[in-house]
Amino acid sequence: MMLFLKLSLLTLIISAPGLIVSRENMITCYSHVQRLTCETGLIKVKSSVYGRTNSITCNTNRPSSEVTNTNCALRITTIADRCNGLKECELKTELLGNPDPCYGTYKYYNTTYDCINGHFVVICEQGYSTLDCGSDSIEIINANYGRGNSRTCSNGIPSFQTQNTNCYAPNTLSTVAAMCKGKKTCTVEASNTIFNDPCVGTVKYLTVSYICTREIVTCESSTATLNCGAHRINIISANYGRTDSTTCSSGRPASQISNKNCYTPDALNKIAARCEGQSSCEVPATNVVFSDPCYGTYKYLTIVYSCV
Ligand SMILES: *[C@@H]1O[C@H](CO)[C@@H](O)[C@H](O)[C@H]1NC(C)=O
């Protein structure tokens, strides 16, 4: 259940319409380098498929026996894990270690990704940096301690210490999220004592990508006011309903606050249609706006948004 909630929040964040600057697609034939880049914004992979779904793509100089099977598609997460939150990302595809979904067929990698608005920091090993959301809250998109290219944090370093570009500390994202999520500022350190050395002898760095969000909670029949001053409102997630028994509970009988499973699935779209791109916006927390998702329950409106 917890995992489901986590995943669905992440999905909401990823699908927030205003965060997306552009959508891109990249096809890379097997054993070549896949390079994803965002001219503006940060990479957020939507889907990566390893296999073959048509006979024309990547068929140059290949015998027909290797390109006729077009029913081979393995969804992989390795590219998202490596590339999400970066501005550019190069991967030697056979180093990803994905299992072969159709032996004897010449395959390719098909990645569709968005470029989203966000902050990106790089901290060389033994450095510190403070993520700063001002009065807003930090939401971590991705993080890695290790090395994914030989250029970053390499000035004056002997090349044998920057050659390993396939170095990833698997616990980085969960560690940084546990330290920083929801805080206004958060100091992170690129150090082996925090992340466990993922590649002894290689000079490493920490990359962190994050967005700054605000949450407002409005009890039923009041009105939420979103304000971004000189910036534009970007809705990240929203719900009209009830998911705990304490929020907006004062003076309410137990029967009106006991339902903790009350959601309005299209709340995000409704609020986005009203507020997205404006500098300020008012949203009444009422059944008139959202339709009643749980009759008899006293509800509240939760909106997470950022100013871009
Ligand atoms: C790549 O994936 C996208 C999205 O799933 C799909 O629309 C497109 O047809 C795929 N292209 C190839 C060449 O497989």
Image (cartoon, helix red, strand yellow):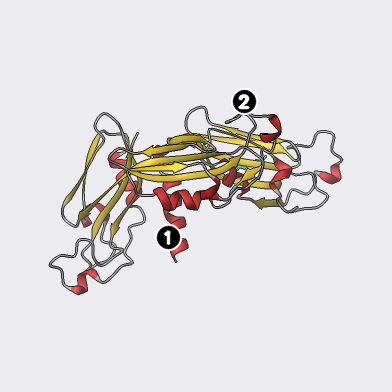
How packed mark 1 is, by other alpha carbons closer than 10 Å (few <14, some 14-19, many 20 or more), is few
Residue 209 pos. (x, y %) = 47, 40
Query: Tag on residue 5?
Result: 1
Q: Residue furthest left?
A: 251
Residue 53 seen in render: no
> What amino acid is at disc 2?
Gly
Q: Are marks 1 and 2 in contact (CB under 8 Å)?
A: no
Secondary structure type for disc 2: loop
Instruction: Identify the residue at horizontal 61%, vertical 41% (top origin).
Output: 111
| Residue position marked by numbered label 2 in the rendering | 156
Instruction: Identify the residue at horizontal 60%, vertical 48% (top origin).
Output: 197
Residue 72 pos. (x, y %) = 72, 51
- Which quadrant does the N terminus fall into? bottom left
Q: Residue furthest top?
A: 156
Q: Is 246 on the left or on the right of 101, as rendered?
A: left
Instruction: Identify the residue at horizontal 26%, vertical 57% (top origin).
Output: 291
- Which badge, 1 or 2, is on the more N-terminal residue? 1
> What amino acid is at disc 1?
Leu
In front: mark 1 or mark 2?
Answer: 2
Residue 285 pos. (x, y %) = 21, 53
Residue 189 pos. (x, y %) = 47, 42
Secondary structure type for disc 1: helix
Residue 218 seen in render: yes
Mark 2 C-beta to ligand 1 under 8 Å: no
Task: Measure the alpha-carbon separation of dots 1 and 2.
Answer: 45 Å
Which of the 4 image quadrants contains residue 262? bottom left
- Which quadrant does the C terminus fall into? top left
How packed mark 2 is, by other alpha carbons closer than 10 Å (few <14, some 14-19, many 20 or more), is few
Query: Tag on residue 170?
Result: none
Please state the quadrant of the image where ligand 1 appears: top right
Instruction: Identify the residue at horizontal 19%, vertical 61% (top origin).
Output: 248
